[in-house]
């Protein structure tokens, strides 16, 4: 069994494995009974819990105690919860609540998901064209919801795309912790690996320029490319080289090794990967329209 959790590498553990956790068996906010520890990541633990009011399974994401004093990490955690509350869509993991433990650790309550993330799926091989189109459309529809709320995800990557029950056409976007609400913030110019994942960073992210939905479209283009070809768009020998490639190099044609990929689908992916935001799809609606008839 797998459960939606943090996007970092995780150590999967049942309630009987590993050292005793003081939260196991406890009831949070007089409502959520902790049953197991499905995932432990660098930033926190994700617990399987029962919502006693609704008699339903939920996931509780709890920040590690030693990170509570880190203001930047707290901000990211709070931003993920805030963004999640405003995004209700079948292709986005729903945030159901949030709070703070007596230890000072913030937590958020999320819908319970079984399946695997796209990164795990791609380690077993590429997707077929039909599977890819189903995946791309479901993800793009989730991005369209975020765009409609003025939210830029800023960290679209396979690890942040969850396949419910392992089905590619039931994808949900995870981890809006790096998201920015464009209408409320003007500090969208941070750059570097701490503000994205290098293999999926848009050129404007690398250069420290303002980002908008078109930056998410570029990152999603990187995901589409990898799903279809089995290789990353750019994969240099260092983080610096990869970021340079995003800014300066033209992606290799998808059909150079994968001739079964339709020409129109290849053109959709490559348009999403244009260096200049003005040359990409200008909205997720445009991207969706192009994906509906890619043959």
Image: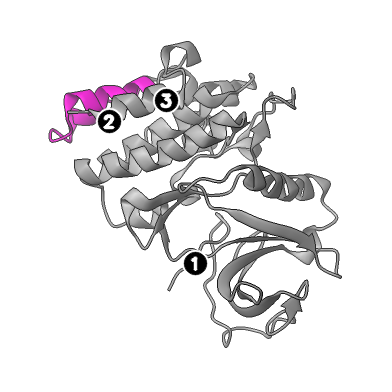
As helix, strand or loop, the secondary structure at mark 3 comes to helix
Quadrant where the image shows the C terminus:
top left
CA–CA distance in space, label 3 to label 2:
11 Å
Q: Nearer the viewer, mark 2 or mark 1?
A: 2
- Residue 172 x %, y %: 46, 50
The residue beneath circle 2 is 292
CA separation, marks 2 and 1?
30 Å
Please, what secondary structure does the residue beneath circle 2 have? helix
Horizontal and vertical percent for residue 185?
74, 26
State the mark number for residue 285. 3
> Does residue 212 appear to the left or right of 165 in the view shown?
right
Q: Residues within 10 Å of mark 2 (few under 14, many from 20)?
A: few
Closer to the chain start, of discs 3 and 2, is: 3
Residue 202, horizontal then vertical, whole percent = 51, 26
Q: Mark number for residue 3?
A: 1
Magenta span of residues: 251-273
Quadrant where the N terminus sits is: bottom left
Q: Quadrant of residue 133?
A: top left
Residue 259 among magenta residues = yes
Work out whether residue 111 can be spotted: yes
Residue farthest to the bottom, as pictured: 16
* CA separation in Å, label 3 and label 1: 30 Å
**Classed neighbour count for the residue bearing mark 1: other residues with Cα under 10 Å, few (<14), some (14–19), many (≥20):** many
Q: Residues within 10 Å of mark 3 (few under 14, many from 20)?
A: some
């Amino acid at each position: 069994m797998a459960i939606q959790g943090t996007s970092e590498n995780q150590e999967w553990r049942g309630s009987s494995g590993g050292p005793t956790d003081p939260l196991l068996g406890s009831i949070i906010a007089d409502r959520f009974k902790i049953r197991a520890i499905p995932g432990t990541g660098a930033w926190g633990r994700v617990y399987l819990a029962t919502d006693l009011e609704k008699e339903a399974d939920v996931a509780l994401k709890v920040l590690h105690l030693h990170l509570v004093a880190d203001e930047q990490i707290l901000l990211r955690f709070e931003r993920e919860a805030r963004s999640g509350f405003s995004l209700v869509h079948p292709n986005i993991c729903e945030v159901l609540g949030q709070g703070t433990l007596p230890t000072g650790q913030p937590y958020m309550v999320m819908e319970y998901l079984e399946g695997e993330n796209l990164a795990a799926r791609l380690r077993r091989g590429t997707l077929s064209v039909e599977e890819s189109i189903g995946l791309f459309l479901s993800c793009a529809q989730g991005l369209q919801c975020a765009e409609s709320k003025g939210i830029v995800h800023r960290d679209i990557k396979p690890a942040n795309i969850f396949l419910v029950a392992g089905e590619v056409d039931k994808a949900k976007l995870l981890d809006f912790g790096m998201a920015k609400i464009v209408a409320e913030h003007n500090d969208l110019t941070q750059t570097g690996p701490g503000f994205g994942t290098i293999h999926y960073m848009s050129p404007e992210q690398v250069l420290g320029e303002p980002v908008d939905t078109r930056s998410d479209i570029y990152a999603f283009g990187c995901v589409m490319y990898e799903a279809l070809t089995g290789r990353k768009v750019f994969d240099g020998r260092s983080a610096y080289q990869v970021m340079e490639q995003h800014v300066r190099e033209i992606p290799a044609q998808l059909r150079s090794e994968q001739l079964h990929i339709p020409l129109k689908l290849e053109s959709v992916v490559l348009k999403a990967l244009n260096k200049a935001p003005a040359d990409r799809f200008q909205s997720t609606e445009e991207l969706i329209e192009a994906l509906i008839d890619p043959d």
